[in-house]
Amino acid sequence: MTQPTPTERLRAFISSESAGGIMLIVAATIALAIANSSLLSQYQGFLATPVNFTAGDLVTIDKPLVLWINDGLMALFFFLIGLEVKREIVTGQLRNWKQASLPVYAAIGGMAVPALVFVAINAGSPENIRGWAIPAATDIAFALGLLALLGSRVPVALKALLLAIAIIDDIGAIAIIALFYTENMNLSALALALVPAAGMLLLNRFGVARTIPYFLLGAFLWICVLKSGVHATLAGVVTAMFVPIATGEERPLERLEHALHPWVAFLVLPIFAFANAGVSFAGAGLEALLAPLSLGIAAGLVVGKQIGIFGACWIAAKTGMATLPPEVTWRHVYGLSCLAGIGFTMSLFIGGLAFVDSTQVDAVKMGVLSGSLVSALIGMTVLAGTPRAGRIIGKDALHA
């Protein structure tokens, strides 16, 4: 059987990711509709349903349903991210500096500037500063889903650039979660996590291509990390790093990635969106949106992402540190910079780690949803006016 080429794999991945973005939109819309209806109390009660898991006297996990979704199901999402990151670094767009330089600069700018915008707006509200990383995130499924609606007006190279930026953005988000949102660490549990990690290292070294042993050890690792105080989703990333790219004729990483992606795109992320996007706007006026926390997040996503990504790309290109991909114009880059302001999934996730107070959590949701919506509208408007791929005259043209 002929193996698909890297280009074919990229197109298939983008197509699936785009469809998943549409599912996210549907799930978020349903959550918002329920949260602003007479079903709000049932919605909140459902998410607060206690769910416990006990394995003898060794393990007891007792959490409300929403935390099983955020800590458990989202570990699969981070596992998939880990697989994508490893593949891109070893064989994909990030395997050499020439290909990786532009998205690296763009991702750094796209994380740093939104965080600075947030901090500037919340300088007088120290209780909110913990949320500085919320607008630094990008939701790749939403962004690619909207790009797919533009068809041939968007060159594949632009989608690949957005994908690379989002993957580097995810690496940054993983590091931020590990470094800044981990408290009350249980060193014994963390030390125990070395056991399944060592087991997966041995599996990798001996070229074990079967994926079930990695899943079993990964589940053990998830429990250890959960009990350690480090956010449990990071266990998914660690597990992915041990899955081999290839062992002989077998390609376990690629096989796992293809098998998991539909489940994550069409089940895990929509469930997360349904559980986390439901915010009631009852009694919330313009003053709620202009409060420092929600305004800082929205401004970080809308203004910070545009300045950070477009500015970083422009400086890198003008100084010769990087070049734009073929058929990608500066108008494309600006539109991409706007769409990268769709933080949604990752922004809501980081917001849930940053705050537990219900008022702050609602402000986070309001800021993320409003900032993501405005970013989507601006980005789609900018890109809708670009010429169809293959009809672009002058790579550096700002206008069609």
Image (cartoon, rainbow, N blue to C red):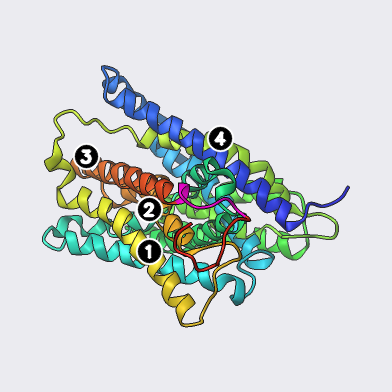
Residue type at tag 3: Ser
> Separation of disc 2 and disc 3 at Cα?
24 Å
Which residue in the structure is indicated by mark 2?
341
Which residue in the structure is indicated by mark 4?
266
Q: Which mark is residue 111?
A: 1
Say whether marks 2 and 3 touch (CB < 8 Å).
no
Image-quadrant location for residue 19: top right
Earlier sequence position, callout 1 versus callout 2: 1
Q: Which mark is residue 358?
A: 3
Callout 1: SS: helix
Earlier sequence position, callout 2 versus callout 3: 2
Earlier sequence position, callout 2 versus callout 4: 4
Which residue is found at the position 63% from the left and 65% from the top?
93
Of labels 2 and 3, the one closer to you: 2
Of labels 1 and 2, the one closer to you: 2
User: Magenta span covers which residues?
Assistant: 383-389
Callout 3: SS: helix
> Separation of disc 3 and disc 1 at Cα?
26 Å
Residue 337 in sight: yes
